């Protein structure tokens, strides 16, 4: 693990104390060489000069000068130690791929993205959509501190909040959870189908949050932050190794934030993450991780639902996401997240490892929130209030063997194992008040409707999902350039829905569900990979929301297929990737009778490409683009229309500059354009295209003998107003201009 006090991924020069330490090490080595020369070992020293010695010093050693004379005659030497460079694509970063094991992005035959914890801190992200601001394949549909906190679309497909999120590879229910990004080492994104790697999930992709773990170097840091309009935060990061030879490690991260949000809401959040490990023997490691987060927020912006009876050919005029006219302090979202994981890693042989872990996750939500049912282009709406307590639990176990074997001239990289998952969902027995309709209002006038409610409302078990899976993958190295991947996941799947009385209202079960994957990979050179891949996936049957005519019913699982051809390349000064893809997914949408139905397919075809380049010592430029064509096919309705939520074109760019005359100062700017997006399957309403520009600066210095990092960021610099697609037939006003500040000190 790199010491973050001395190195930066951005390629900045090391701090002055490190340069001095490097010079002293160099001087000590040179002095040792002269001493050896005086003892009659000059010839040997000349043949094998000390590491880092230059021609001038080795020549001095060979001349037989005395140590004192040599020190006096040493020429002035300037030692420059550059930090390890890493492009924004991080293609050589190891990432978790579930049933594929751990491999670098470069060796993964699917499109992936990695965002480091340092980048999260530099940009001061506040919600999931911000995490992937530089990825054109990801569209932001999220609002921090609301039930929409983790809503994004990937290649035009929504991500599955119930099965598409992991923490250190373990599943958890993400609904309404704003993660403590300060506690994360990085965020990994697998784009597209994850059925083989992770089991049943919607085909948008899988997000894996990787928490900070104890490394070899001690860490003691404290930072303070401010975000408009008045949210103050404090974060502590402590890491130590202890015991004989540093056998045991512990790392704890604590984050607290409280204050007024940009839309006059309130937030009070406390989060703690604990990571323990023990290197019991040379081959046996054990670990335990825990996360506990309690969050209370109020006054969040309500969801806006474009009803089937909406009158108008376009959406109403845009409004600012900073408005507090749409809701009041009676609306709230209180969440609790708990995750506990324990595992064992054992090195069976030099090329074989066994890893097993078990996790328990619990998330709860107490929410009172409005859905504004939009009626017309003038902005008139009906305020429908939803109130209730929800609980979700996930119990998960996985065991894997990973290693290499040779059969004749071929090398096999094998991963095989098993997984068991038990998931339960509890939802409220009733919503309030009455029919849920509080009254009428207009987007451009204050909403005076209020409904205050307590917590602890009655809930009941609405569904249980059980998965038992066996999986196997084999990557065969045919030559030094060619390799073939084949994988198979075998799943027994059961899903049941229940009434308040406990009676079973719906059930789906199928044994022997097979989801395969295949890939062909070719190394153009050691750090350039061409690949073609195919994967299948199933997603759980959707529980129909109450706003549909068939609310409460459970639909059958849907099967998806993905075809992808791509290239990834990583070099010292530049990196790039590109992919062509086609995804075929069973379509579900509300028909003209407002019944959520499964009918036909939704097709997604597109191109995504990105790259970064370092220009000289100070400039770095990165860009990303996605072209996407989507349509409904083989159904009885909407055939040929664009799929809701899928923008036709997205482009993102980022420029950073290390200011040479102010060492430690880096400034940057990024922009992202999101094209027209259909709001609903009927294809009669669009959000319109919009571009967001963000700027920021980071300054690293030393104060009182400690490393200090000062950060500032302005999001939505132009204060652009726009409608953001959130979900099928749902929209939200985009976030307003916000300013964030942070100061971090390393002890």
Image (spheres, grey):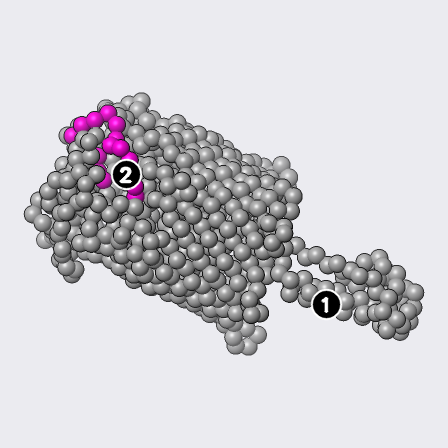
Q: With 362 as the anchor, is 185 left or right in this view?
A: right
User: Against 274, is 110 above or below?
Assistant: above
Q: What residue is shown at x 35% (from left), y 33% (from top)?
A: 646
Residue 679 placement, left or right of 505: right
User: Residue 597: x and y, percent?
Assistant: 21, 33
In the foreground, 520 or 164: 164
* Residue 734: image location, x then y, percent: 32, 41
Specify the farthest residue to the top: 640
- The tag on residue 729 is none
User: Compared with residue 565, is residue 209 higher up or lower down, i.e. above or below?
Assistant: below
What residue is at 81 percent from the left and 58 percent from the top?
A: 54
Q: Can you identify the residue that label 1 sits on? A: 24
On whether residue 37 falls in the magenta region, the answer is: no
**Mark 1 closeness class: few <14, some 14–19, many ≥20 residues within 10 Å:** few
Give SS at disc 2.
Answer: loop
Circle 2 residue: 319
Q: Is residue 422 visible?
A: no
Of the pair 664 and 676, the residue shown nearer to us: 664
Q: Residue at x 42, y 43 (%)?
A: 717
Residue range highlighted in magenta: 304-321
Q: Secondary structure at mark 1?
A: helix
Q: Residues within 10 Å of mark 2 (few under 14, many from 20)?
A: some
């Amino acid at each position: 693990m790199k010491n973050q006090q001395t190195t930066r991924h951005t390629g900045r020069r090391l701090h002055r104390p490190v340069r001095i330490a490097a010079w002293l090490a160099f001087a000590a080595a040179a002095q040792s060489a002269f001493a050896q020369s005086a003892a009659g070992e000059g010839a040997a020293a000349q043949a094998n000069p000390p590491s880092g010695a230059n021609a001038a010093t080795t020549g001095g050693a060979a001349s037989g000068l005395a140590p004192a004379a040599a020190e006096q005659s040493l020429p002035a030497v300037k030692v420059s130690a550059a930090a390890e460079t890493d492009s924004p694509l991080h293609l050589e970063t190891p990432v978790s791929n579930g049933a594929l094991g751990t491999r670098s992005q470069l060796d993964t035959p699917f499109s992936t993205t990695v965002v480091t914890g340092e980048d999260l801190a530099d940009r001061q992200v506040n919600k999931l959509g911000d995490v992937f601001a530089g990825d054109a394949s990801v569209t932001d549909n999220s609002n921090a501190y609301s039930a929409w906190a983790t809503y994004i679309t990937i290649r035009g497909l929504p991500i599955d909040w119930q099965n598409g999120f992991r923490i250190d590879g373990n599943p958890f229910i993400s609904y309404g959870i704003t993660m403590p990004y300060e506690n994360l080492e990085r965020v990994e994104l697998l784009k597209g189908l994850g059925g083989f790697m992770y089991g049943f999930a919607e085909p948008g992709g899988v997000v894996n949050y990787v928490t900070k773990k104890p490394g070899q170097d001690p860490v003691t840091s404290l930072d303070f932050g401010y975000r408009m309009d008045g949210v103050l935060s404090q974060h502590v990061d402590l890491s130590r190794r202890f015991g004989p030879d540093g056998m045991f490690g512990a790392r704890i991260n604590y984050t607290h934030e409280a204050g007024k949000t940009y839309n006059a809401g309130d937030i009070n959040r406390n989060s703690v993450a604990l990571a323990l490990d023990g290197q019991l023997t040379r081959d046996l490691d054990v670990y335990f991780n825990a996360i506990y987060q309690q969050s209370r927020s109020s006054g969040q912006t309500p969801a806006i639902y474009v009803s089937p009876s909406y009158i108008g050919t376009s959406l109403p005029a845009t409004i600012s996401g900073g408005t507090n006219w749409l809701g009041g302090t009676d609306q709230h979202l209180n969440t609790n997240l708990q995750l506990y994981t324990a595992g064992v890693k054992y090195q069976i042989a030099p090329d074989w490892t066994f890893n097993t872990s078990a996790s328990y996750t619990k998330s709860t939500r107490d929410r009172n929130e409005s859905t504004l049912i939009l009626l017309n282009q003038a902005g008139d709406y009906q305020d429908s209030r939803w109130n209730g307590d929800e609980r979700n639990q996930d119990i998960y176990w996985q065991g894997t063997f990973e290693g290499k074997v040779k059969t004749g001239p071929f090398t096999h990289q094998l991963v095989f194992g098993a997984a068991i998952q038990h998931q339960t969902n509890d939802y409220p027995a009733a919503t309030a008040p009455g029919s849920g309709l509080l009254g009428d209002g207009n987007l451009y006038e204050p909403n005076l409707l209020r409904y205050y409610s307590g917590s602890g409302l009655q809930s009941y078990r609405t569904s249980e999902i059980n998965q038992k899976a066996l999986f196997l993958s084999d990557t065969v190295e045919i030559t030094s350039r060619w390799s073939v991947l084949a994988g198979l996941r075998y799943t027994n799947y059961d899903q049941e829905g229940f009434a308040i009385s406990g009676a079973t209202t719906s059930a789906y079960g199928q044994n022997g569900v097979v989801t395969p994957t295949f890939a062909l990979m070719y190394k153009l050179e050691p750090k350039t990979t061409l690949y073609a891949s195919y994967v299948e996936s199933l997603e759980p049957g959707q529980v129909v929301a109450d706003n549909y005519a068939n609310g409460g019913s459970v639909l059958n699982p849907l099967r998806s297929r993905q075809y992808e051809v791509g290239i990834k390349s990583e070099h010292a000064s530049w990196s790039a990737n590109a992919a062509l893809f086609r995804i075929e997914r069973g379509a579900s949408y509300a028909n003209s009778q407002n019944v959520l139905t499964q009918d036909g397919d939704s097709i997604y075809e597109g191109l995504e490409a990105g790259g970064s380049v370092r220009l000289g010592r100070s400039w770095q430029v990165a860009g990303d683009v996605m072209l996407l064509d989507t349509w409904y096919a083989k159904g009885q309705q909407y055939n040929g229309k664009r799929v809701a939520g899928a923008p036709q074109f997205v482009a993102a760019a980022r420029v950073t500059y290390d200011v040479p005359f102010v060492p430690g100062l880096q400034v940057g700017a990024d922009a992202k354009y999101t094209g027209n997006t259909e709001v609903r399957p009927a294809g009669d309403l669009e959000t319109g295209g919009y571009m967001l520009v963000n700027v920021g600066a980071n300054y690293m210095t030393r104060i009182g003998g400690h490393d200090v990092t000062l950060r500032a960021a302005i999001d939505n610099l132009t204060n652009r107003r726009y409608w953001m697609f959130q979900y099928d037939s749902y929209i939200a006003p985009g976030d307003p201009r916000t300013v964030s500040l942070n100061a971090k000190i390393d002890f």
